Image (cartoon, rainbow, N blue to C red):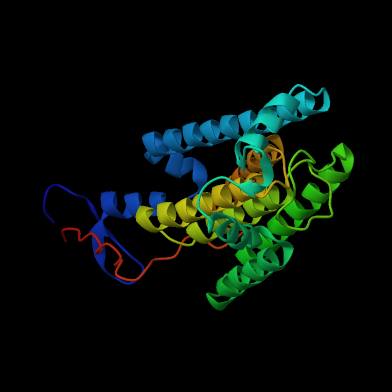
Amino acid sequence: MEGGDIGIVTRFGRRTGTRSALVRWLRNGNFTVNMLLNPHRWLFREQRFLALFLVGAALVAGFVALAGEMQEGETHAFDIAILETLREPGNAAQLIGPGWLQSVATDITALGGVTVLALVSALAIAFLLLRGRWRQAIFTTLATAGGAVMGSLLKGLFARSRPEVVPHLVEVTSLSFPSGHSLNSAIVYLTLAVMIARSFTDRTSRVFTVAVAVVLVLAIGCTRVVLGVHYPTDVLAGWTLGAAWALLVGMVADVLQKQHRIEEPSKGEGEADAPPHRTSN
């Protein structure tokens, strides 16, 4: 033996370093042992969890404050000013900007409709099932369905009528606050992005997946105002609550993955496991 390492004989009859064997055993141990071995790593995770919790709480508080201001009529002047600014002076039926803007806005806003969101959700869940991530697929189904139910209940609770200050450029029938397209697209796209991103180990794939979802949600929300079917505060409310829901889902998924109740991130292509550490005999 070299380096003064005391050797022990394993059950396979091979001699190995006591110190190396002890480290491997501890690394494969429980949460408490790992936390003691890697205090900086676990401290960082706890700090990140707290930061995410505070962001989520701020989003919910923002939604509550916005809903209160809306019910008191404090946001009415702001909402009307934005809607009127987006139309040609003297012709409220005509959008400002190029002629193709209305067509593009109509196409983008359809991505937040019930049919498209249901289809995207089904495809994403099928993707998880094809990868053998059954528990993650079930969790994602419950998360997206629960968010949709929440949105429907809130619309009935606030019962805000659609804006009438400018003509609607697409047909709408439901209530206005919060924006269903903004809320449901945030819930579905951000939740799916968070869950799919959690199946990757590399940071680049995770960031790209979430960034695409964020851009898509913002674009859908903006088109609702451009088309005159929602007040700006309807959209802001949908964004804040949808983001809070997706953040909550991500935090819960993180805890469940650490407890091995849903599948953990898998290695992507091109990612090789680190070579095993060789000890002196």
Query: Considering depth in this image, is 56 or 30 the residue closer to the camera?
Result: 56
Residue 164 is left or right of residue 101, and the answer is right
**Residue 19 in picture, x, y percent from top left:** 27, 49
Residue farthest bottom in this picture = 130
User: Could one spot residue 185 in this view of the protein?
Assistant: yes
Residue 63 is left or right of residue 20, and the answer is right
**Residue 155 in picture, x, y percent from top left:** 83, 44
Query: Considering depth in this image, is 270 or 230 the residue closer to the camera?
Result: 230
User: Could one spot residue 264 in this view of the protein?
Assistant: no
Residue depicted at x 80% and y 24%: 73
Location of residue 240 (image quadrant): top right
Q: How many marks?
A: 0
Residue 236 is left or right of residue 43, and the answer is right
Q: Is residue 150 above or below residue 120?
A: above
Residue 109 is left or right of residue 178, and the answer is left
Location of residue 9 (image quadrant): bottom left
Residue depicted at x 52% and y 47%: 97
Quadrant location of the C terminus in the rendered image: bottom left
Q: In this view, does 27 lie above or below 126?
A: above
Residue depicted at x 43% and y 61%: 200
Residue depicted at x 83% and y 27%: 71
Query: Considering depth in this image, is 260 or 121 the residue closer to the camera?
Result: 121
Quadrant location of the N terminus in the rendered image: bottom left
**Residue 89 in picture, x, y percent from top left:** 62, 37
Residue farthest front in this picture = 90
Q: In this view, does 163 lie above or below 281?
A: above
